[in-house]
Image: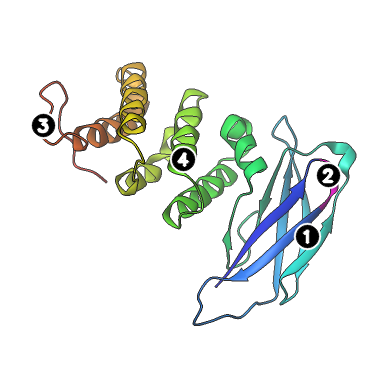
Amino acid sequence: MNECEPIWDTSAPQKVLIKQRAISPSHPFLRHHKIKVGLFAEDGTVEVKEVFLKNQENTELMIDGSKNFKGIFLNYQDEDFMQVVIDKQSLSFFKDHLHIVPDLTTKRMIIRQINQMISTDKMSHSNFIDFICSSLQKGVDPSILKDSFSFLYHLQFPTSAEKEQTISRFLALVDQYVSNPQYQSIVAALQGWVNAQFAEPNPDLPFYEPF
């Protein structure tokens, strides 16, 4: 399988470099890919470009820089077999604007790639947690975030302070959503993760099995 990542610079927004690399050292082959690229405006609307990637490392995509795109998503509509890395600028945009992306399928695709990135160490745990918390607070449908919570159990915190800060953030979300029936699976996941962080059961929290 191949992995593709967009490289672009806001100082030169008319050109996107799409980098392709082989994932497995035992199969170091680049392939031809025909994909769609989603270019997202600040209001969540998307312009779609079709791109043919040759079996080479770099492909240039020219775009209209005057449209001031804020986010890029490769393999839009999931028509090719590849893994996708979301670049830093697009990740920041989707963190704050996922709730206005117009269709549920695209939101699910973005979350799927976020989960893939945390599982392959291409995203920091702090960015992952920020993404989850921001998406919940901005009203993203909790059903598309449910799978993300299984990855919480694989996170390694560099300091105890960061771990305690995450616990506090999650408990605040629990307080915010505990009475909302739509969020009960998310509340259970958050409470389950928090409970698992204590060496001994916390009597103030119910126990939930992790996903």
2 vs 1, front mark? 2
* Image quadrant in which you'd find residue 59: bottom right
Query: From the viewer's perspective, is 186 left or right of 48?
Result: left
Of pointers 4 and 2, the one earlier in the residue sequence: 2
Image location (x, y in percent) of residue 84: 59, 58
**Residue at 10% in and 23% down:** 203
Of pointers 4 and 3, the one earlier in the residue sequence: 4
Q: Please, is residue 185 above or below residue 147 in the view?
A: above
Q: Is 205 covered by the magenta stretch? A: no
Q: CA distance from mark 4 to mark 2?
A: 26 Å
Find out whether the residues at labels 4 and 2 contact each other: C-beta distance under 8 Å.
no
Image location (x, y in percent) of residue 178: 30, 20
Q: CA distance from mark 3 to mark 2?
A: 52 Å
Q: Please, is residue 209 above or below residue 59 in the view?
A: above
Image location (x, y in percent) of residue 72: 70, 47
What residue is shown with label 2?
13
Image location (x, y in percent) of residue 19: 69, 63
Nearer to us in this view, 189 or 6 = 6
Q: What's the residue type where badge 1 is placed?
A: Glu
Give the residues drawn in magenta, as a range. Answer: 11-15
Query: From the viewer's perspective, is 138 left or right of 74?
Result: left
Q: What's the residue type where badge 4 is placed?
A: Phe
Q: Secondary structure at mark 1?
A: strand
Q: Secondary structure at mark 3?
A: loop
Query: Which secondary structure dominates the residues rendered in magenta?
Result: strand
**Residue at 42% in and 33% down:** 142
What residue is shown with label 1?
50
